[in-house]
Amino acid sequence: MVEGIIRGDRASLAAALNLLDDRRSAARHQASELLCDLQAQAPSAEASRLIGITGPPGAGKSSLTAALIKVWRQRGLRIGVLAVDPSSPVSGGALLGDRLRMKTSDSDDDVFVRSLACRGDFGGLSAEAWPMAQVMLAGFDVTLVETVGVGQREIDVSGMCDTTCYVAQPGSGDSIQFLKAGILEVPQVLVVNKEDMGDVARRTLSELSGALRRDTLDGDWQVPVLSASATRGTGIEALADALEAHHQYLLAHGELHARRQHSQAAWILKRLREEFGSHGLDLLGGEQNLRTQLSAEPEALFQQYDDLRQRLLGAWTKPGTT
């Protein structure tokens, strides 16, 4: 399966993602072995881009994603997409709306779209998104993660991806709300979609540009504010260039590996906190010490998580432990 993923074989990739989505104990053990083998055998993923697309409902995230895929394919890049959809209230599965709206061609073997349900996670991403992204990074030049986009709290994507693109909706009256929620501190690239709306889109662009000039910097990176229209296909080349520029910035400053290690540590800490609470993290030495330890270790994802989980389970069963 690992060899197939590295070759870009769609069947191997689909089987791996299904395995990561399986929560049974036997499947979790196999998934842990898969990620360990993938880390050992796959070439460096630093050339691969991990990009998050987020924004409010109706902003045109899926349409913009489809337009970006078209540009990247013209540039000869292979694209993988994780589309996080709302969960069905009946089955708990993904409703597949974003996947349908992207309208990607099933005949293009170099584009792979996988839908997964958010499963009620308030961060806008399901727990499976980060492990799945690690698999897709090994097989694609660009891995896109599109969030469910159901409010201002859904910003976990910024802690998971190398580059986060926020898609703003013209005329939504959200500019002040963005400032209040701190949402403008999240993206490395901001784009106002639907520039074909004319004055409304230009006014939103002006408001957000002014807000970013006042208080938003990501290190030495100045967040660009762009305008595009997914329906007309305008501004998409410039958006693709800006996303690539941030990836090159991370490489030039030696920040890419550290960012991904930090993302992995954040994923593990969130899972442990959900199961054992803050007291569990305290038993392991505290969140900050754990974050430093995890960011420095080269072990595969599930191996790190399982080791810490077993330590906590052992501590919980010791006499006198509360």
Image (spheres, rainbow, N blue to C red):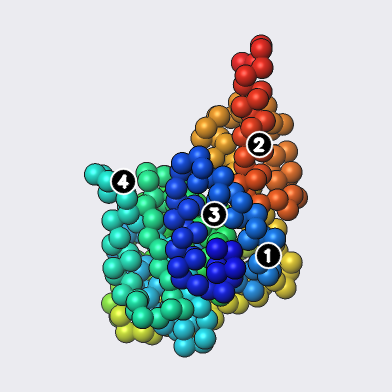
Q: Residue at x 46, y 84 (%)?
A: 73
Q: Earlier in the sequence, mark 2 or mark 4?
A: 4
Of residue 305 and residue 218, the one placed in the foreground of this image is 305
Marks 3/1: CA–CA distance: 16 Å
The amino acid type found where label 4 is placed reads Gly
Marks 3/4: CA–CA distance: 20 Å
Q: In this image, 95 relative to 153: left or right?
A: left
Vertical side of 201 occupied by 278: above or below: above
Instruction: Name the residue tied to disc 1.
Output: 41
The amino acid type found where label 1 is placed reads Gln
Instruction: Name the residue tied to disc 3.
Output: 131
> Residue 227, image x and y in percent?
42, 77
Residue 216 seen in the current view: no
Marks 2/1: CA–CA distance: 24 Å
Marks 2/3: CA–CA distance: 17 Å
Cβ–Cβ below 8 Å for labels 3 and 4? no
Instruction: Name the residue tied to disc 4.
Output: 92
Q: Secondary structure at mark 3?
A: helix
Q: Residue at x 33, y 72 (%)?
A: 102
Vertical side of 177 occupied by 313: above or below: above
Q: Earlier in the sequence, mark 4 or mark 1?
A: 1
Q: Earlier in the sequence, mark 3 or mark 4?
A: 4
Question: Closer to the camera: disc 4 or disc 1?
Answer: 1
Vertical side of 126 occupied by 260: above or below: below
Identify the image quadrant of the N terminus: bottom right
